[in-house]
Amino acid sequence: MNDRLSFYRKRNSPVHALNPFTKLILVSALIFYGLTAKGFWTATLMVAFVLLPLALASKLLKEYVGVALKVILPTAGFMFVMQSVFIPGGTTEIFRLGFISVELETVQRSYLIASRIFLFISAFVLLLLTTHPSELMSDLTRRGLPPQFAYVIISTLQIIPQMQAKAQTIIAAQRSRGLDTESSFFKRAGLLVPLVGPLVFGSLVEVEERAIAIEARGFTSTRTKTFLHDIPDTPADKFIRWTLTLFIIISLAARLWLS
Amino acid sequence: MQTGFTSQDFIRFLIVMAVMGVLFGWAYATKRMQKDFSSTMTWVLIPVAIAINISIGQLVVVLKLPVYLDSIGTVLVGVLCGPWAGALAGALSNFVAGIIFDPGWWPWIPVAAVIGLTAGFCANMGFFKTWWKVAVTGFLIALAATITGSPIAVLLGGISASGSSIITAFLLQTGKGIFESVLTTNFLVEPIDKISTSLLAFAILDGLSTRYLARFPRGENAQLNQQKRTIELVIALVVVAILVIVTILFVVPLVNQ
């Protein structure tokens, strides 16, 4: 399977060795705390002093910073600038651009939202960098998630590259017949039919065969299923999970108590 | 200025959750939900539908069309397998997009789920059998997606990296509130996208054999009425035109408030 499709990078690090469920709880706890805590700089500080060290510990600092700069920062930065400039309200004017005025309060509010979005996305990116999606799904299945969900996620990740390859083939084939992706709007809209048709019908036809194949392999069986790979779950994992759960309960209680 | 949740937002959120819970419980108790998932075909169609969503979404970018069309697969599942399967397909579609592109897709999971749910309910009422009915379904999907999506957009600050945010920014400058501006923008953008999505899904179903469709739990939803095609198409266009006019009539007072 190609590497580009998931963020996952294999390393030999303590973070990779954690149970996938522990990492999921860890990331959820970080996000939950970052979104509910009161301080203005909380989200920023958490990225700098929790996520970056975690990335360093998982030997993925370069990859993490790369994704953060290439994917997350443009989105969050664009939102910050747009919201600061265009959302009205606030009283302390910083500067004026023609009829648009930029106020201190709006900038602060935009920064708060942008930094929280940055925290949310980058925490999950860290989870995806250190955990293979199918490993996470099979661990969740072992903990009671219906196995059909794992099937859907894992097989989707396998189908998408095949389908993208098919789409490329179809585009190439239609280009050789004179398809022009640079022509006028109505022509381009008309192009959808010869491109979408073969792609969709081809993959829908496979559905029936696939259904018969997995039924023959006991997909609908109600017996307890066994697992091919054993995913380690150490006492340390359990300890971390309980600590984090406790931490979340305490922080939520403190938040409700103080406000 | 207000940031984060207020207690009013929280109460609204609880009401929405309660409505969803009642709907969910009703569907579960009356075994409507179980019917959606009664066949292996549903579970096999969902991954393919997600792949269709993502591939066509990318194709549209290549063709530089001003729509998303990233929920054709979701609508197909909603029609063929039922509303709850459609909701699951939509939700997992955004989940997978979060895994392979960036987790910024995850806040929009409820919107994708509502699209599949609405498509399924409309199809159950027989609203996926002729061109004009499909256009109405597309409009209802857009309405539901707008209602679900706007609060999420406001929570994320109102202006995102998508192109339609320019409209929102413009409305904000004319002195509208954030929620109003986001809602208006979505009302202007969503119907075009969702009606084309539904019509394309309908064209796909039209090309599939009856024998194939009958294998799905709610294949009868897609047994199309074989009638005079050209007249149907004309009616569909008229309906789209009427819906656009209604939208404008509905949105203009909102803007002029």
Image (cartoon, rainbow, N blue to C red):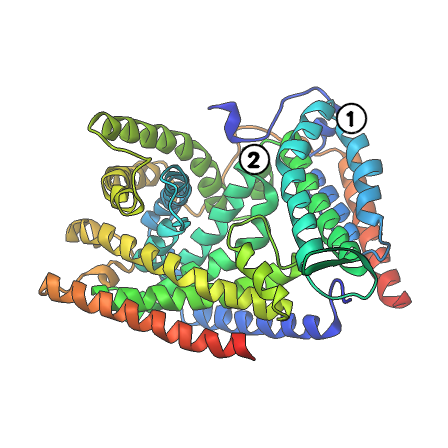
Q: On the rendered structure, is A225 left or right of B230? A: right
- Which numbered disc, 2 or 1, marks the residue closer to the eye? 1
- What's under tag 1, amino acid-wise? Leu
Q: Nearer the viewer, residue A88 or B198?
A: A88
Q: Local crowd at mark 2 within 10 Å, few (<14), some, or many (≥20)?
A: many
Q: Nearer the viewer, residue A178 or A72?
A: A178
Q: Residue furthest left?
A: B228
Q: Which mark is residue A206?
A: none
Which chain's residue wears label 2?
A: A
Q: Residue at x 91, y 66 (%)?
A: A258
Q: State yes or no: discs 2 and 1 in contact (Cβ < 8 Å).
A: no
User: To which quarter of the image does residue A124 belong?
Assistant: top right
Q: On the rendered structure, is B129 left or right of A20? A: left
Q: Nearer the viewer, residue A146 or B57?
A: B57
Mark 2 vs mark 1, CA separation in Å: 21 Å
Q: Which residue is mark 2?
A: A133
Position in image of residue A14 (x %, y %):
76, 26
Q: Residue at x 58, y 48 (%)?
A: B161
Position in image of residue A219 (x %, y %):
39, 42
Q: Local crowd at mark 1 within 10 Å, few (<14), some, or many (≥20)?
A: some
- What's under tag 2, amino acid-wise? Pro
Position in image of residue A13 (x %, y %):
74, 22
Q: On the rendered structure, is B116 left or right of A216? A: right
Q: Residue furthest front?
A: A98
Q: Residue at x 78, y 26 (%)?
A: A56
Which chain's residue wears label 1?
A: A
Q: Which residue is mark 1?
A: A56
Dot 2 falls on a residue whose secondary structure is: helix
Q: On the rendered structure, is A88 left or right of B80? A: right
